Image: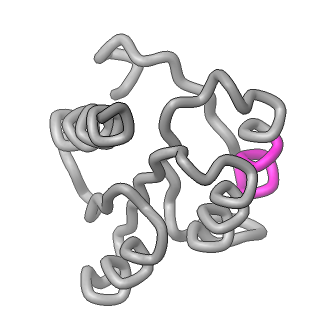
Amino acid sequence: MLENAEFDVMAAADGAEALDLVQNNLGLIDCAVIDLTMPGMDGTEVAGAIRKLNPGLPIILMSGYAPDSSAAAADAATSGFLQKPFTAEALVDSVRAALITNNS
């Protein structure tokens, strides 16, 4: 979805791989989109670890679980939250908004 909107995308299979990507590409990643449910580490753990590596990086969490618990997790230290299922347009809009907010 993001590649169709001409974003460069790096994908990770789990939280540990996501952290490696961020750590090895600190100056190249402009936004992280993280699922709350992932193998190994959950999305809030990954977001917290990313915050330590790059405090200003916009982070968007997404989940298919109940909005109340997911939204509370997203408020912790993120730039947004997407409830699954979501449209490609909603994802692209969320990333663009996070980037604009981060650059202002």
The color scheme shown is: one colour
The quarter of the rendered structure image containing the C terminus is: top left
Residue found at x 72% / y 63%: 49
Viewer-proximal residue among 96 and 52: 52
Looking at this view, name the residue that lies furthest to the bottom.
69
Q: Position of residue 70 (x, y in %)?
A: 36, 79
Q: Where 78 falls versus 33 (above or below)?
A: below
In the rendered image, the vertical position of residue 96 relative to residue 34, given as above or below: above
> Where in the figure is residue 37, as x and y percent of width and height?
55, 69
104 vs 45: above or below:
above
Overall secondary structure of the magenta section = helix
Position of 63 compared to 22: left or right?
A: left
Q: Quadrant of residue 81?
A: bottom left
How many badges with numbers are in the image? 0
Q: Is residue 20 left or right of residue 33?
A: right
Tell me residue 24's x, y (percent).
83, 31
Span colored in magenta: 14-20
Q: Residue at x 29, y 84 (%)?
A: 66
Q: Residue furthest top?
A: 6
Q: Is residue 17 magenta?
A: yes
Q: Quadrant of the N terminus?
A: top left
Q: Quadrant of residue 14?
A: bottom right
- Image quadrant where residue 52 sits: bottom right
Q: On the rendered structure, is 6 left or right of 100?
A: right
Q: Residue 43 at x, y = what percent?
A: 58, 67
- In the rendered image, residue 99 lying in the magenta stretch gets the answer no
